[in-house]
Image (cartoon, grey):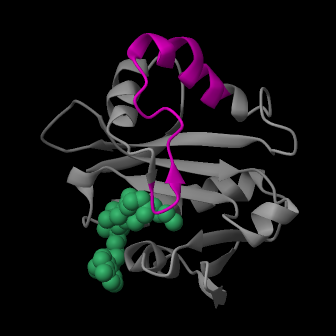
Amino acid sequence: MKLYLKPANMEDIEKEFSFVSCVPADENGFINTNAGMDFETFKQKGLPGMIAASKGEGLPEGYVPETFYFLWFEDDESSEPVIVGEFRLRHNLTPSLEKGSGHVGQFIGKDFRGRGFCTEGLRLLVEEAKKIVPENELYLHCNLDNQSSLRVMLKNGGVIHHKNENGYFVRIKLR
Ligand SMILES: CC(C)(COP(=O)(O)OP(=O)(O)OC[C@H]1O[C@@H](n2cnc3c(N)ncnc32)[C@H](O)[C@@H]1OP(=O)(O)O)[C@@H](O)C(=O)NCCC(=O)NCCS
């Protein structure tokens, strides 16, 4: 069994589109701006927008570069890789990210939850973050009722920095 992160790219568009089409517009604060999009619009705008975001292009004022990764799974018995999740890494903090959603977004497809995929995906993302993020700690956030997301963070060395009515604010040491 193999799990790996791969940045959004045009070559994998068919599988990326099928995955993204099943991600709700907003689940626990994980926002999918491509929800409900048809394939042609995804090809012309959605996916190129995700790729450009990693270079800091085409973003709203004040937004920092953000890399979109898909989490790919290859079962030993099947040679066909499938996308099981999506992770996002914002390259550095701004005052609003610091108080809000932090560096990371994580999402696992409904059929693949509860199998440790997010735990391993976040571990891989932390390794990516060490190469990209200038801050010494990765900032993460989840809603108070999102215990599985919190658990994934804590299993990756996360420490609850504080908690308020908006959720848990977790930090993972990068260096
Ligand atoms: C949160 C999410 C990413 C977790 O993905 P996942 O692949 O199911 O996570 P994992 O299987 O790696 O780990 C889940 C852990 O939470 C635990 N868990 C699940 N439900 C729980 C609950 N209600 N209370 C406490 N722990 C819980 C599991 O037991 C597991 O821990 P364990 O391995 O120690 O047993 C996934 O549910 C998801 O995509 N949700 C929708 C989007 C979302 O909430 N994103 C996060 C926004 S911050």
Percent x, y of residue 48 = 61, 20
Identified at 53% across, 41% down, the residue is: 69
Percent x, y of residue 34 = 49, 32
* Image vertical order of residue 136 relative to residue 108, above or below: below
Identified at 49% across, 57% down, the residue is: 106
Number of labels in the image equals: 0
Task: Name the side, left or right, on which 31 lies relative to 98.
Answer: left
Closer to the camera, 61 or 65?
61
Task: Name the side, left or right, on which 75 lies relative to 64.
Answer: left
Task: Name the side, left or right, on which 1 lies relative to 56.
Answer: left
Ligand 1 sits in which quadrant? bottom left
Q: Residue furthest left?
A: 77
* Image vertical order of residue 131 relative to residue 18, above or below: below
Task: For residue 120, say whether it is visible.
Answer: no
Check if residue 103 falls in the magenta segment: no
Task: Name the side, left or right, on which 95 lies relative to 160.
Answer: right
* Location of residue 40 (image quadrant): top left
Identified at 31% across, 44% down, the residue is: 73
* Image vertical order of residue 64 relative to residue 103, above or below: above
Percent x, y of residue 140 = 63, 70
Task: For residue 170, say whether it is visible.
Answer: yes
Percent x, y of residue 22 = 32, 39
Closer to the camera, 66 or 28?
28
Which quadrant is home to the C terminus?
A: bottom right
Bounds of the magenta segment? 27-51
Identified at 61% across, 30% down, the residue is: 50
